[in-house]
């Protein structure tokens, strides 16, 4: 499962998540740098990533452009890396279902 973590989530989560989400990547590690949400959206689409974000803008981009990419949207507000990682682990089954279901484009995590 390929997760692309948005810039508002700490880059430190990638190393911590590799055991479970082995193909994780943080947007800051992409060269050349992706300058805006639309560029990130299309990068995720082209490279088959799920976007992990706190940012509602990706939901809006998806409503305008469809999916892929699929989105894991944290509705918790900004929170610690540990909380994000724990919630991802707790929601592994739902994330897998998101990937497999052709009719669902977003998973909201509270």
Image (tube, rainbow, N blue to C red):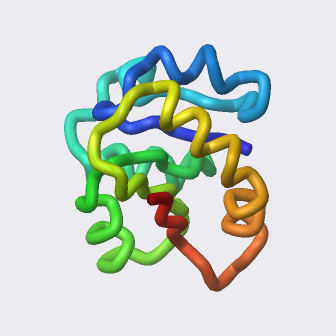
Foreground residue among 93 and 26: 93
Pinpoint residue 8: horizontal percent, then vertical percent.
Answer: 29, 34
Report the number of discs.
0
In the picture, measured across the screen, residue 94 lies left or right of residue 55, that is: right
Rendered residue at 47%/65% (across/down):
108
Rendered residue at 68%/58% (across/down):
95
Rendered residue at 57%/33% (across/down):
85
In the picture, measured across the screen, residue 96 lies left or right of residue 13, that is: right
User: Eyeballing the image, is 58 above or below 27?
Assistant: below
Quadrant containing the C terminus in the rendered view: bottom left
Rendered residue at 38%/71% (across/down):
62
Quadrant containing the N terminus in the rendered view: top right
Pinpoint residue 71: horizontal percent, then vertical percent.
Answer: 49, 59
Residue 31 appears in the figure:
no
Asked where in the image residue 68 lies, by quadrant, the reply is bottom right
Foreground residue among 14 and 64: 14
User: Eyeballing the image, is 70 above or below 81?
Assistant: below
Asked where in the image residue 2 lies, by quadrant, the reply is top right
Which residue is most to the bottom?
103
User: Eyeballing the image, is 70 above or below 19?
Assistant: below
Residue 44 appears in the figure:
yes
In the picture, measured across the screen, residue 105 lies left or right of residue 100, that is: left
Asked where in the image residue 36 lies, by quadrant, the reply is top left
């Amino acid at each position: 499962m390929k997760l692309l973590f948005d810039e508002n989530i700490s880059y430190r989560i990638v190393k911590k998540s590799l055991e479970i989400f082995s193909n994780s990547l943080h947007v800051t590690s992409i060269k050349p740098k992706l300058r805006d949400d639309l560029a990130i959206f299309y990068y995720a689409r082209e490279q088959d990533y799920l976007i992990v974000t706190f940012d509602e803008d990706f939901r809006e981009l998806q409503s305008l452009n469809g999916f892929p990419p699929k989105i894991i949207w944290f509705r918790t507000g900004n929170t610690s890396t540990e909380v994000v990682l724990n919630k991802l682990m707790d929601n592994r089954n739902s994330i897998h279902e998101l990937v497999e279901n052709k009719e669902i484009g977003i998973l909201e995590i509270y």
